[in-house]
Amino acid sequence: MSDQAFLAEGLHENRHEMTYGGALSFLRRKYTRELTGVDVAVSGVPYDCAVTYRPGCRLGPRAVRAASVQLQELKSFPYGIDPFEALAVIDYGDCALDPHHPETVVGAIEAHCAGILAGGAKPLTLGGDHFVAYPLIRAVAEKHGPVALIQFDAHCDTWAGDGAEMDHGTMFGRAAAQGIVDASRSTQVGLRTYNEADHGFEILTAPWVHRNGIDAALEVIHARAGDAPVYVSFDVDGLDPAFAPGTGTPVVGGLASWQALELMRGLKGLNLVGMDVVEVSPPFDHAEITALAAATVAYEWLCLLALEKGAKPKPVGRL
């Protein structure tokens, strides 16, 4: 039987269906807004009016959903688990926005995320440009207190602004100044554009990661975050354009997809409370390279939560 996204009877159901057919949802999860018993609600925020260069990431959520189909087909690598046996995940659909009234956008996104949190679920959000992380974090911090931000990015997104603008390059400086992000416990990974100040964040530039390796980066991330609530914000331009061409502000010299996956897997043990994956711009993508990378890093986050809930890994081969 196909169309699991609409016809699944339970939250843990994982039917076999054609990867190239059927109704699309993220990882074929059930489309619903019922949050009872739900661990994670995946939703899209199709907004890109805050970009500073190439647009198109308003189409990101649908592209990431489409690229996720093969990830649902087999047990996860390298764990050998079906994460949905342990973890109840739904596709909550997209946040309703009125881009013709931009003054309503921040409130709409924040309320959307707050509703998910109020239902007891963790938010996994598909962007959209990176600005959408700001209202998402506002909602998460309202519930959990100031978050430790782990930001994968080519850019710092802490450039100076007037504190009210809507662009995707100033919002984390604002979030730190407002106390919803605890910069002293936060780490930015993959940066390779210049800013004159670190604003209290630990910055692991892409060249530093290339030279020092995954384990050294994870040691810093874990030491900084400690037991704080951790929000992961993954801008796909943190990846080198060879691995993520479909994004609005590509910068060469970035992380390889394998590095990003190893870093995500290394977040095991942290107090993970939310995640977004942003800046996928399908008009500039090729063969779903970028969308597939985005879907996979989001899937890795779900696998971490499944392991936390007791899923037992059964790896095969040398890891």
Image: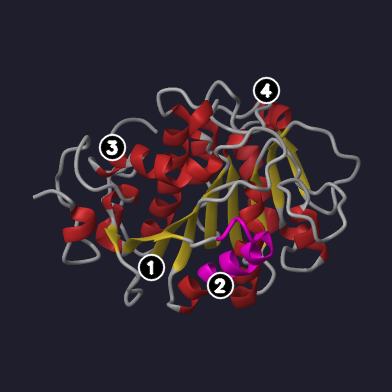
Find the magenta span and give its range: 98-113
The residues tagged by marks 4 and 2 sit, at their Cα atoms, a distance apart of 37 Å
In space, the residues marked 3 and 4 are separated at their CA atoms by 28 Å
Disc 1 or 2, which lies upstream in sequence?
Answer: 1
Relative horizontal placement of residue 37, taking residue 249 as reference (left or right): left
Q: Nearer the viewer, mark 1 or mark 2?
A: 2
Please rate how many residues cluster around mark 1, counting C-alpha atoms within 10 Å: few if below 14, some from 14 to 19, many from 20: many
Residue that label 1 marks = 39
Q: Which residue is mark 3?
A: 70
From this viewpoint, which residue is outermost toward the front? 100
Q: Which residue is mark 2?
A: 111
Give amino acid for label 4: Gly
- Left or right of 58, for residue 176: right
Q: Are marks 4 and 2 in contact (CB under 8 Å)?
A: no
Q: Upstream in the sequence, badge 1 or badge 4?
A: 1
Q: Nearer the viewer, residue 220 or 190?
A: 190
Residues at marks 1 and 2 touching, judged by CB atoms closer than 8 Å? no
How many numbered discs?
4
Alpha carbon of mark 1 to alpha carbon of mark 2: how far? 19 Å
State the residue at coordinates (39%, 33%): 319
Element on which disc 2 rests: helix
